[in-house]
Amino acid sequence: SISRFISTWTMLNIEVNYDREFVYLRSDNSKAGRIELERPSQMDTTNALLCSIFLNGNTTIINSSEDYEVDDLVEFLNSIGADIKKENKKVLHLWGRDKTNLKFDEIGYCCFTPPHLIEEPKMEDIKKKK
């Protein structure tokens, strides 16, 4: 449910507001930290990883999913320059980095669309989409 995503975002100090149609995220004060997931869910773990990857500092994800899809995502993120380690089956440590320190290609840009949604859009980006 979206409430678990919102919980993860607020643990990273991302400001969340919503109305009946939209969820608005503001990341001016976002920071790496400790994320304790309500339950080990693939979607929740993926959300936590993708939102933490660009936050400088150490993020610990407690109660992470053991699904192979999460292992595949961790392997992919590490292959493009992330630093993610499993402490045990349910705990992940991620050392976030600035976007410029990761290696991207066209697939990488597609994969990282969700984290870019937490940034304020630039007018020139909006004009390009039209």
Image (cartoon, rainbow, N blue to C red):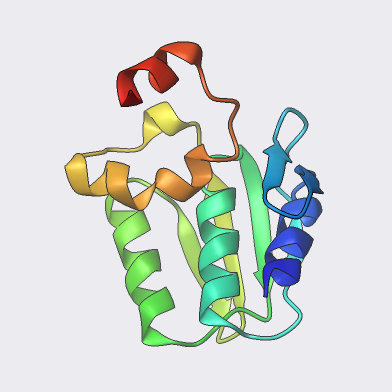
Furthest-front residue in view? 20
**Looking at this view, is 119 or 36 the one in front?**
119
Q: Is residue 66 left or right of residue 63?
A: left
Q: Is residue 9 left or right of residue 85?
A: right
* Residue sitting at x 70%, y 34%: 27
Q: Is residue 77 left or right of residue 3?
A: left
* Residue sitting at x 75%, y 55%: 20
* Residue sitting at x 67%, y 62%: 60
Q: Is residue 1 left or right of residue 112?
A: right
> Does residue 41 sit above or below 118 in this rendering?
below
Image quadrant holding the C terminus, namely: top left
> Does residue 118 sit above or below 35 in this rendering?
above
Residue 5 locus on image (x, y percent): 68, 64
Residue 9 locus on image (x, y percent): 72, 53
**Looking at this view, is 111 or 84 the one in front?**
111
> Does residue 108 sit above or below 42 in this rendering?
above
Q: Residue 44 lies in what quarter of the image?
A: bottom right
Image quadrant holding the N terminus, namely: bottom right
> Does residue 38 sit above or below 7 in this rendering?
below
Q: Total number of numbered labels?
A: 0
Residue 2 locus on image (x, y percent): 68, 68
Q: Residue 77 lies in what quarter of the image?
A: bottom left
Residue 39 locus on image (x, y percent): 70, 85
Furthest-top residue in view? 124
Furthest-left residue in view? 106
* Residue sitting at x 44%, y 87%: 67
